[in-house]
Image (cartoon, rainbow, N blue to C red):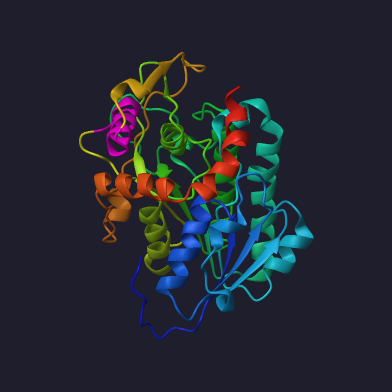
Amino acid sequence: MSEPTTDNRQPTTILVTGGAGFIGSGFIHEYLKKHPRDTIVNLDALTYAGNPKNLNGVDKKRYRFIGGDIADKKTVREALKGVDAVVHFAAESHVTRSEKDPDIFYRTNVRGTRVLLEEAVKAGIKKFIHVSTDEVYGPIVKGYFNESDKKHDSSQATSPYAKSKAEADELAQSYFGKLPLIIVRPTNNFGPRQYPEKALPRWITNLLQGQKAPVWGEGRQVRDWLYVEDTCRAIDLLLGKGKWGEIYNIGANHRPEMNNKTVVLKVAKLLGKPESDVELVPDPRPDHDFRYGVDTAKIKALDWATGKFEPQLKATVEWYRDNENWWKPLKSEAEKLYK
């Protein structure tokens, strides 16, 4: 999503919720580069994972920030004024945090989504993208879930985080017919500006500090590593070509699949660290989801494809190596989650 478009449509104003976070900020950067006539309003509560520095370098003439909570009707109503489309990223998103404080996950992910949907209908929003997650399907030993495989409840999800997102997903589906709405279910995103509590940036920053990179259990858990720019391109594509009232999986579908130990060893190699710097530690959730997998045929039919994992991982590692001033102030707070 790097080359500007040359379409003749009217300029669009998009409300991005959670735009100071990891994926949201990536979307704002990429969207404004590609669509030089459009503007973005960013509504973000700036919780611990929302960082204003993530928006450094955006075109301030076409970008406006509103600090506020998506669960507050008045704030959302004001933010939607003059807006044509909504891309809803805002969510509490860490599984471990959800186990310690599930209430805040339900407040933001479920109640906040309900408020946003209600107000979007009242505001006459023309396009609405709800960003869900592959974790609403729960784990799968082999094979891949397609978009119709989610049950109409949260029973497949296995953590408070995933259950709150599953309920938000159901809320969004209930607005098919009331809003021009698309639901996307991306897999495990990675890339620059990801808060260092998440596995990949935690491994990278630990190794950069001369510490061990901890891998739970034997490191055999399988995740589908999706580069954040690929996610952003998919959402941009769906804003223009997606079918409203539909659900789209977004995933990398690596062949062969990679388990966590494989990925962290690649990181260590990129940083010139020995394999002994990767440390297997007792798994605090030994019964947690072992593997996720989604069928991406539907979005690939729209001519979307991912980039190659190896250069994407290299670019991510290099970003953290070159931006210590971004992650070092966050590192000690992020590590508290694991103590």
Q: Identify the image quadrant of the C terminus.
A: top right
Q: Is 138 situated above or below 117?
A: above
Residue 97: x and y in percent read: 61, 31
Q: Is 84 situated above or below 100?
A: below
Question: In the image, is 310 to the left or to the right of 332?
Answer: left
Kindly give the residue lying farthest to the front in the view shown: 210
- Asked if residue 70 lies in the magenta stretch, the reply is no
Kindly give the residue lying farthest to the left in the view shown: 256
228 or 290, which is in the foreground?
228
Q: Is 279 situated above or below 129?
A: above
Residue at 42% in and 44% down? 189
Residue 156: x and y in percent read: 49, 29
Residue 147 in view here: yes
Residue at 28% in and 41% down? 253
- The answer to which image quadrant residue 103 occupies is top right
Highlighted magenta segment, given as a residue range: 257-272
223 or 180, which is in the foreground?
223
Residue at 54% in and 63% down? 56
Residue 277: x and y in percent read: 36, 24
Residue at 42% in and 58% down? 232
